[in-house]
Amino acid sequence: MTLAGLRVGLAGPLPPPAGGMANQTAQLAELLRREGAVVTIVQTNAPCVPRFVGAIKGVRGLFRLVPYAVRLWRIAGQTDVLHIMANSGWSWHLVAAPAIWIAWLRGVPRVVNYRGGEAASFLARSSSLIRRSLRRADVLAVPSGFLHEVFGRFGMRSEIVPNIIDLERFHPADATARPRVPHFVVARNLEPIYDIPTALRAFALVREGAPDARMTVAGTGPDRDALERLCATLGVAGSVVFSGRLERDDMARLYRSATAVVNPSRVDNMPNSVLEAMASGVPVVSTNVGGVPFVLRDGITGLLVNAGDDAAMANALKRILDDEALVARIRGAALADVQQYAWPRVRERWTDVYARARSHERAEARPA
């Protein structure tokens, strides 16, 4: 099977905001179209009317549900396969599950692409409801071995199709052009699960021996004011820049200016920021939570520390500053590993997934 001429309905979020799933949805649509597929996007995060509804999370989803379902019903009748971007919590119940059932009623092959970093707790609470909907899916695809194992523990079979990294956009700077001044980058939103305070405390410890070091935090979120106050308390306010969320080209340039990328998250699956940093030839210091150890091999393609341990994170950053041989090894191994996330390899997996989903649908329709 080829992708040329394949009609793909893609149900998922789009930027803005430019989060991981939204970026993956937009990127997948663009790449499928380059292959000749006819892609119709059903946007799951369309703006709400009236405006006040958009600020209320549960109400926001309910307000979107009816027009979303109507559009899904119409688009499903015009596609060869429906690709559903899925997440945990309300997103599953109000976005993914309705898409599965509508496509099933329309007789359209269904591929569920689950990406929730909190999958284990969500499945523990709601496995019976999730299983009921997934029985109507033809293929469950997940981006990491971590999620593959999580679903396996609940008796649900999945296929691994990794995230896509644009290696033309995210590429290394010259190998000899390390920043003269230590520059650490955090590319996560300013929310509790990403634990930016631990990164700031680690940075303050590093600056005791490298007083010219600086940090850029690229993300948005409700914790910004509290984080700026913490910077003042730690005495690093003049050395930390909160840049807000950056466009992809600006983000790529920021990675290439970095000495290291820091991922302090407490909950994670397959963070794009880690993969993008690897592709940019920048060493990553990350917490060893969720799916991160499936992406970063400690001491080989990055350095891993326990969540919330600012002292260990600071020590790992000091190793990056002090050990050029370690940096060179990490850089080379990470650049080799990240090739598996390039589009030519991921394209083959999606082609196979779509073919099997369509074969399963034809098999179901075949007379007994």
Image (cartoon, rainbow, N blue to C red):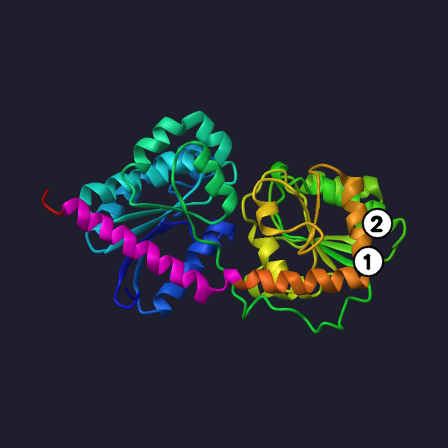
Q: Residue at x 81, y 47 (%)?
A: 315
Whether residue 200 is visible, yes or no, is yes
225 in magenta: no
| Residues in magenta, as a range | 340-365
Q: Position of residue 13 (x, y in %)?
A: 42, 49
Q: Position of residue 24 (x, y in %)?
A: 46, 55
Please state if 228 lies on the left or on the right of 322 as rendered. left
Q: Residue at x 63, y 43 (%)?
A: 190
Q: Are marks 1 and 2 in contact (CB under 8 Å)?
A: yes
Q: Earlier in the sequence, mark 1 or mark 2?
A: 2
Asked whether 118 or 75 is in front, the reply is: 118
Q: Which residue is mark 2?
A: 206
Tag 2: amino acid? Val
User: Which quarter shows the N terminus?
Assistant: bottom left
Q: Residue at x 78, y 42 (%)?
A: 312
* Badge number at residue 10: none
- Please tell me whether residue 129 is drawn above or below residue 196 in the rendered image: above
User: Residue most toward the left?
Assistant: 367
Q: Which residue is mark 1?
A: 321
Identify the image quadrant of residue 34.
bottom left
Q: Position of residue 57 (x, y in %)?
A: 46, 35
Tag 1: amino acid? Leu
Q: Disc 1 versus disc 2: distance between alpha carbons?
A: 10 Å
Please state if 156 lies on the left or on the right of 136 as rendered. right
Label 1 crowding class (10 Å Cα cut-off): few <14, some 14-19, many 20+? some
Label 2 crowding class (10 Å Cα cut-off): few <14, some 14-19, many 20+? many
Please state if 69 lies on the left or on the right of 283 as rendered. left
- Please tell me whether residue 56 is drawn above or below residue 144 in the rendered image: above
Asked whether 310 or 200 is in front, the reply is: 310
- Of circles 1 and 2, the one toward us is 1
Q: Secondary structure under badge 2?
A: helix
Q: Main secondary structure of the magenta part?
A: helix
